[in-house]
Image: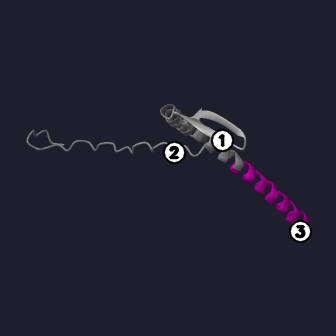
Amino acid sequence: MSSDPSVPVDPPPAETSAPPPPPAPIGFTRAGALWSALIAGFLVLIVLLVFVTQNTSPVDLAFLTWTWSLPTGVAILLAAISGGLVTALVGTARIFQLRRAAKKSLAARR
């Protein structure tokens, strides 16, 4: 090395350290799915609450010999719930039918 100040001295090489790897993403969990479903359910309930409170004018309903009066929002909500229940019952019956057929098919193979 020279002691002459006019001669530039190269700085020592900087230590190059690689940045730490990013953390691994967390995959699908049942708790995460449950939390997402709860949030979605509460959003749907808020929308339904707004719908029912904005449609409060009474409507007369008649079914066979029964007649009654309900707020419009409640009547539409009850109709939607009834339709969903009928759909769930038909779907449940179909699932049981398919399970029974699958069990018979499995027993026939043995």
Task: Specify the segment rendered in magenta.
Answer: 87-110
Q: Earlier in the sequence, mark 2 or mark 3?
A: 2
Residue 78, position as x, y percentages in the image? 63, 39
Residue 46, position as x, y percentages in the image? 51, 33
Mark identifier at residue 24 = 2
- Residue contact between numbered discs 2 and 3, judged by CB atoms under 8 Å: no
Residue at 26% x, 42% y is: 12
Give the class, few, some or many, for how many residues have Cα within 10 Å of label 1's Cα (few <14, many ≥20).
few
Residue at 10% x, 40% y is: 4
Residue 95 versus residue 26: which sits nearer the camera? 95
Could you say which quadrant of the image residue 81 lies in? top right
Q: On the rendered image, what quadrant is the C terminus found in?
A: bottom right
Residue at 9% x, 38% y is: 5
How much space separates mark 3 and mark 1, taking CA atoms? 54 Å
Residue at 8% x, 42% y is: 6
Residue 53, position as x, y percentages in the image? 50, 31
Q: What is the chief secondary structure element of the magenta stretch?
A: helix
- Residue marked by disc 3: 109
Q: Amino acid at mark 1?
A: Ala
Q: Secondary structure at mark 2?
A: loop
- Residue marked by disc 1: 62
How much space separates mark 2 and mark 3, taking CA atoms? 45 Å
Q: On the rendered image, what quadrant is the N terminus found in?
A: top left
Q: Is residue 107 left or right of residue 61?
A: right
